[in-house]
Image (cartoon, helix red, strand yellow):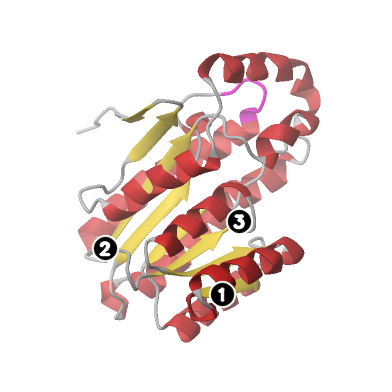
Amino acid sequence: MALNGQIAVVTGAAMGIGRAIAEILLQNGAKVALIDVNESAGRTLVDLLEKQFGAERVLFLCCDVESEEQTKDAFQRVAETFGGLDIFCNNAGILNEIEWQKTISINLVCAIRANYLALEHMSRLNGGRGGVIVNISSVAGIAHLPSCPVYTASKHGLVGFTRAVAAASAASGYGVRVNALCPSFVQTQLFANGSSKLGQFSHLAQASYQVAETIGILSVGEVAECFLELATDETKNGDALLLFPKRKQYATFPSIV
């Protein structure tokens, strides 16, 4: 799947992993809509990207993904501005064991809503061109992190949803592939500030950081490169790619058939 001329949406795109993914999409010829609730960071980034790649290839939309109305409007504006949708990267996410309901809301409920909106725009049954969705999960979506059980649950849920909706899309003839990217520890604000959001499990923070020191910490660029693999390899659908420093592997799951 070539990216030149493709139309992409990235949520949580103002910084960190989302920014790196938006940049690699632009570097490979796509048009990119950046969606983020942080308007200041988003507009600053878009100004830089417009100078580098051209204003006609970059769009920023300030959007709180917890708002169904704002999210619907954002997807509609992308379709009207660029003429469709081919790639969706669901990256918006938080780690907050104190406000655990918000973690479930953003990491899972809002992710499902955004996936369904992307499917509406991309499905060949609706007149779309087909395409690909990549959900940014976590190694916590396959294994577990004792310091953040709710974050773990939300990312497990996202992997399960990804696999099920990928199979549903294939069986229904939507023409949309859906995959999950599951990086280990990444040098982002979420990682740097995570210990302050662990609440009753804050005493386990040091153990998590020791694991990170042992296995290493990924750069956002390394995550973006693996996103590109899942987005462009047309043999991948319903796959979960685990990413660690210096190695990666596709997760295997038991069959119930």
In this picture, residue 117 sits left or right of residue 105: left
Give the percent coordinates (x, y) of residue 38.
73, 61
In this picture, residue 85 sits left or right of residue 59: left
Residue 92, placed above or below residue 95: below
Give the percent coordinates (x, y) of residue 203.
78, 16
Q: Mark 2 and mark 1 in contact? Answer it, CB < 8 Å.
A: no
Q: Which residue is mark 3?
A: 12
- Count neighbours of disc 3 (C-alpha within 10 A) and say few if under 14, some if 14 to 19, many if 20 or more: many
Dot 3 or dot 1: first in sequence order is: 3
Image quarter of residue 210: top right
Image quarter of residue 204: top right
Could you tell me the amino acid type at mark 1? Leu
Q: Which residue is mark 1?
A: 59
Could you tell me the amino acid type at mark 2? Ala
Residue at position x 45%, y 64% in the image: 26
Tell me how far mark 2 sits from mark 3, CA to CA: 24 Å
- Count neighbours of disc 1 (C-alpha within 10 A) and say few if under 14, some if 14 to 19, many if 20 or more: many
Dot 2 or dot 1: first in sequence order is: 2
Report the span colored magenta.
Answer: 145-149
Tell me how far mark 3 sits from mark 1, CA to CA: 14 Å
Residue 113, placed above or below residue 164: below
Could you tell me the amino acid type at mark 3? Gly
Badge 2 marks a residue whose secondary structure is loop
Q: Quadrant of the C terminus?
A: top left
Tell me how far mark 2 sits from mark 1, CA to CA: 21 Å
